[in-house]
Image (cartoon, rainbow, N blue to C red):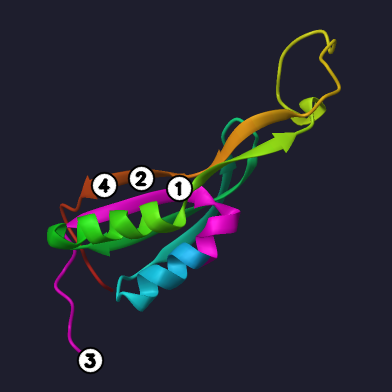
Amino acid sequence: MTERADPTKLVMMIVSDTDADDLMGALVEHGYPVTKIGSTGGFLRRGNVTVFSGVNESEVDKVLELVTEICHARKEFVPVQTLPFIGDGSFSAEPIEVRVGGAIVFVLDVDRFQRI
């Protein structure tokens, strides 16, 4: 097994639960290390997963390509009653279309990497 160089970038990807396993599988298949942390948040307060991968600067674009390929934004219809609106509750009973999925990605410089 070839020893990987110390990472110079930390790619932090916040993705939906539904995309997380596929993304992690693809990252591992391409030889990238991954760490997963469950998280929640966003407009719909649905489950998210935050995936971290420490890579070399030359690998960042390939990681971003995998995220783009796997974590598609899509639209779903959700009941209005489940949305976190502030108001008097006089909303239509019809479901509304909202954007879900996709990813938020941060690429951070690694000042120091230490394996203990």
Q: CA distance from mark 3 to mark 2?
A: 29 Å
Mark 2 residue crowding within 10 angstroms, few (<14) / some (14–19) / many (20+):
some
Answer whether labels 1 and 4 touch (C-beta < 8 Å). no
Q: Which residue is tagged 3? A: 1
Disc 3 versus disc 2: nearer the observer: 2
Q: Which residue is tagged 4? A: 107
Query: Residue placed at 24% from the left, 46% from the top?
Result: 108
Q: CA distance from mark 1 to mark 2?
A: 6 Å
Q: Nearer the viewer, residue 2 or 111?
A: 2
Query: Residue placed at 22% from the left, 55% from the top?
Result: 61
- Percent of width and height locating residue 80: 78, 25
Mark 1 residue crowding within 10 angstroms, few (<14) / some (14–19) / many (20+):
many
Q: Identify which amino acid the numbered label 2 is placed on.
A: Val
Q: Nearer the viewer, residue 23 or 54?
A: 23
Q: Which residue is tagged 1? A: 14
Where 42 falls versus 33 (above or below)? above
Q: Point out the image quarter for the N terminus.
A: bottom left
